[in-house]
Amino acid sequence: MSSSTRNKAPIKQDISKEKNDKQRRPASPASASLKTDSNTCDLDHEVTLLDELGKLLKENQEGHNQTKMSLDRLEQTVLDIKELHKKRAKVHEVIKQLKKKDILARCIYPAQLKLKLGKGEKTYTTLSSAAEVLKHLGVEVRCGERECTEDELKDGWRSSGKKKRDTVLSASDLRAFLQEEA
């Protein structure tokens, strides 16, 4: 019984010899194809990783473009705020001159001038629109050519078109307009 049991179950030493023999044997053509398949799998894995990397790079560039657009909007907002501060400073200069003449005036946001005269209160949206009244009161108003010209053209410009258009003229249009008048 002992001899029949030996033939059926392999001994541990025999198993370890078989493993060592497999490791020492040269690779068979079948095992060579397995290695090629594993190389192909590695290449496929690398390709998928490169594709994913490309997608991430594209998303990053899109995010960068959105960030750039946000920064552009932020920069424009900062420029608008600076321009508003300059306008408010001009209004405050006029208010100081009016206070010296005992005329009540206030600066209303964004950069409007509110005058309290004997007749009542009057609000002017820009200094250039209040220029005539201020000259009559003896107050010096410093307005740029562009502001004065835009203010003069604003009413006619809006009423001439059916659609509401922006009243801002480019610098070249203003120069051409001023040269025609001169």
Image (cartoon, rainbow, N blue to C red):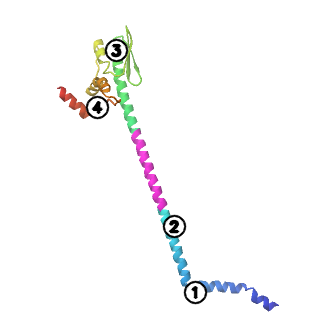
The outermost residue toward the left is 182
Q: Are marks 3 and 2 in contact (CB under 8 Å)?
A: no
Name the amino acid type tagged 1.
Arg
Please identify the dominant SS of the magenta region: helix
Q: Which mark is residue 25?
A: 1
| Discs 2/1, front | 2
* Mark 4 element type: loop
Residue located 50% across and 64% down the image? 48
Give the mark nearer the N terminus: 2 vs 4.
2
Give the mark nearer the N terminus: 4 vs 3.
3
The image quadrant of residue 112 is top left
- Mark 2–mark 1 distance (CA, rounded to whole Å): 30 Å
In the rendered image, the vertical position of residue 32 relative to residue 147, given as above or below: below
The image quadrant of residue 128 is top left
Give the mark nearer the N terminus: 1 vs 4.
1
Residue located 32% across and 26% down the image? 158
In the rendered image, the vertical position of residue 26 relative to residue 173, given as above or below: below
Q: What residue does disc 3 label?
A: 98
Q: Are marks 1 and 4 in contact (CB under 8 Å)?
A: no
Name the amino acid type tagged 3.
Leu
Residue located 55% across and 78% down the image? 34
Q: Position of residue 76 (x, y in %)?
A: 38, 37
Instruction: Answer whether residue 54 is magenta in the image.
Output: yes
Q: Is residue 13 left or right of residue 101?
A: right
Q: Are marks 4 and 3 in contact (CB under 8 Å)?
A: no
Q: Which residues are magenta?
A: 51-73
Q: Is residue 53 left or right of residue 15?
A: left
The image quadrant of residue 111 is top left
The outermost residue toward the bottom is 3
Q: What residue does disc 2 label?
A: 45
Q: What residue does disc 4 label?
A: 169
